[in-house]
Every structure is written in structure tokens, then in C-alpha cells.
Image (tube, grey):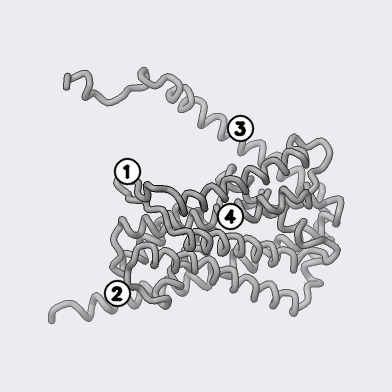
Amino acid sequence: MSHSETQPATHADHPHKSRWSRWKKPLTMLFFLALIVLFTMLAQRIEWDEVFSNLADFKVRTLIIASGVTLVSFLVYACFDLIGRTYIRQDLTWKQILPVGIISYAFNLNLSAWVGGVAMRYRLYSRLGVSKGNIAKILGLSLATNWFGYMVIAGAVFTSGLVRMPPGWKLSTGALQGVGVLLLLVSAGYLVACQFSRRREWSIRGVEINLPSLRMAILQLALGALNWSLMAAVIFTLLPSKLDYPLVLGVLLISAIAGVITHIPAGLGVLEAVFVALLQHEASRGSLVAGLLAYRAIYFILPLLITVVMYLVVEAKAKSLRIAKKPK
């Protein structure tokens, strides 16, 4: 092989990549500025007295129900990692895995996927003696469970036409139904691949990826869809009673994509903007914002506070074990 063949690729070799690198930062800044303007305009149109009045009117029973559904949702998400235990065939107990899943989910929701989904899992599973390769497999399976579950539930809801897009939006109701059909086809394609694909293993950047069995894939889709349904149930419990659950679920699914695109931790402001834009003809802005603020407190902030304590306990136990193992 000649010297020129071994040289790393330069920007000249990839003009399109170089051009994108130059434009990526200013375009991202413009996008965030547009979001700030949007959220400022939204805040100015909201009657904050109504928001605070609705927050004060929440019944204790409603908050308890929302908290109970939140707990079930976190347990369901933690079960993604239980599937991962079977996937990597490692001898870990559910008592070891569930806390990792719950802690990771809370940090993921509030501090981004890199902190919660990746860094926290690597730290906690490393303490349990899981190799980096197997941690990567658990993480990959968890992501697949979440997003293929999303595709199933979103595909069903969007295709049904239960979510009607407001007039003037670039994405029409018919286009949303088309997106739903596409999501269902991708989900079905995943199941077909798991059942019939002859090639079961791939290696991406040194990480080995294996296709799960059809039974495991169906369990993935079921748990993923269930978790999205539970998230919507928490919001539904806290929003005005005249709203239908399928509509709330559909709007949550749309807002999730908007949150992923913006890369804002916890989708802060994006969730509220999408819900108000799509449901303001169904309920007052103040009641919608009040319900969503309560949702953030119950589904995001409260679990984070609890899991910070859980994490500190895990770290303390690990430290005590290290001290006990030191030779005297």
C-alpha cells in the first residue's frame, strides 16, 4: 500500500462534509433562537393566573394516581434491561438490574441520553462486573425497545386519524397518517428480520450486535409501546377531563419527535409548545400548561430526586465493599 493510500482523509476529500461542518453551528444557533422566540411568544399568550389557579386545584387523589402510574412506567422501562440480561446471557438478578434501569431512566429524562442512558449505565453495570461490550449490547437493546415500541404505538395512533393537525400546519393529517403507515411497516420489518434473517450478527465499531429471537422482539415492542402509553396516561390524568386519552397519546408522540430533533434535555419547553399548539382548541392554554407543569414535577423532577439518593446508596455500598476487600 502506498503512502498516499494510508493518509487520513482531509476536508478536501469530503467537500460535502466540510460544507456541513461550516454550516452546522450557525444553523443550530438559528434553530435555538427560533425556539426561544417561539417559547417567549407562547409564554406571553398564557394567562399565568389561570395556570397557578389550576395547579392549586389539583386533588390529592389525582396526584397520587399520576404518581402511581409514573412508578409503573419506571418499572416497565427498567424491564428493558431485564430483556438485556437475557440477551447477553449474564447471571444478574432482577434486584441488581431494576435499580440500574430506574436510575438511568431518571437521569436520561432530565440530563440527556449521554448522561443517563450511556454514562450512568456504564458506571453502574461496570460495578456489577459486566464487560463494556455487554453494556453496549444492553444499551442498544434498550434503545431498540424504546423506539420500536414507539413506532408500533405511534404507527397505530397516527394511522387511525385520531390526531387532527391544525389548519395551516406544514404536516397535514393525511401526511401524519402516511407517517403512521411507514412506522408500522418498519416495526413489521424488524419482526420479519428477527424471524427470518439468516445473518444474525453484525460488528459496528467493534461492538457485536445480534438479532434477538422473534419472541424477544415481540416482548420489546410490547414493553416499549406500554411505556409510551403509561407516559401519556400520566399526562392524561393531569390534563382537563374533557380531553380524550388517544388524543393526548398522539400529541405526546408528536412532541417526542420534536424533543429528539431539538436535543434539549427533558424536551424543556418543546413538550409544552406542541401540546398548546395542538390542543388549545380543545382546552384553555392555562389548564394545559398547569397539567404539563404537574407532569414535569411528577414524572421528571420527583424521580430524579429519588434516584439521586438511590445512586448515592449504590456508590456508598460499592465503596464499603472496596474497603472491606483491601488487605489489612
Q: Which mark is residue 30?
A: 3
Is 231 rendered above or below residue 26?
A: below
Residue depicted at 78% across the width and 64% down the height: 239
Q: Residues within 10 Å of mark 3 (few under 14, many from 20)?
A: few
Q: Residues within 10 Å of mark 4 (few under 14, many from 20)?
A: many
- What residue would you read off at disc 2? 319
Residue 142 x/y as whole percent: 47, 58
Q: Earlier in the sequence, mark 1 or mark 4?
A: 1
Mark 1 to mark 4 CA distance (whole Å): 29 Å
**Three-letter amino acid code at the position of disc 2:** Lys
Q: Earlier in the sequence, mark 2 or mark 1?
A: 1
Q: Earlier in the sequence, mark 3 or mark 4?
A: 3
Residue depicted at 44% across the width and 59% down the height: 213
Contact flag, marks 3 and 2 (Cβ < 8 Å): no
Q: Secondary structure at mark 4?
A: helix
Q: Quadrant of the C terminus?
A: bottom left
Mark 3 to mark 2 CA distance (whole Å): 46 Å
Mark 2 to mark 4 CA distance (whole Å): 31 Å
1 vs 4, front mark = 1
Task: Say which of 13 and 83 sits in front.
Answer: 83
Q: Secondary structure at mark 1?
A: loop
- What residue would you read off at disc 4? 266
Q: Residues within 10 Å of mark 1 (few under 14, many from 20)?
A: few
**Three-letter amino acid code at the position of disc 4:** Ala
